[in-house]
Image: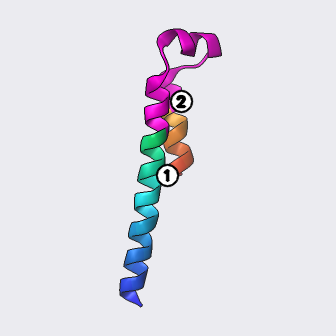
Amino acid sequence: MIFDSIMSRARTSIAKRRQYNRLIAEIDSFSSRDLADMRADRSEMLYQVHKQIYG
C-alpha cells in the first residue's frame, strides 16, 4: 500500500517534469522576434508554465 502510493507519486512527478521540460523547450525555441510578434515575454511565459504544472 505504501509502496504503491510512493510509486504513484513518483510517476506523477516524472510526468509533470516531462511536460514542464517539453513546454520549456518549446518556449526556448521561440526567437526574440517570434515573441515580439506574439507580444509575449519569455520570463512571463516560463512563470506561467511553472504555475500551470506545479500549481
Which circle's residue, 2 or 1, is located before the other in the chain?
Answer: 2
**Residue 29 lies in what quarter of the image?**
top left
> Residue at the location (46% across, 45% down)?
20
Where residue 33 appears, as percent x and y from the top left, is 53, 8
Q: Amino acid at mark 2?
A: Met
Where residue 9 appears, as percent x and y from the top left, is 43, 70
Q: Secondary structure at mark 2?
A: helix
Point out the stretch of residues depicted in magenta: 23-45
Q: Main secondary structure of the magenta part?
A: helix
Where residue 45 appears, as percent x and y from the top left, is 53, 29
Q: Which residue is mark 1?
A: 54
How crowded is the residue under tag 1: few (<14 C-alpha within 10 Å), some, or many (20+)?
few
Find the distance from the CA under tag 2 to the CA under tag 1. 14 Å
Residue 10 or residue 22, whichever sits in front: 22
> Residue at the location (46% across, 65% down)?
12
Q: How is the image coloured?
A: rainbow
Q: Amino acid at mark 1?
A: Tyr
Residue 5: which numbered mark, if any? none
Residue 45: which numbered mark, if any? 2
> Residue at the location (52% across, 49% down)?
53
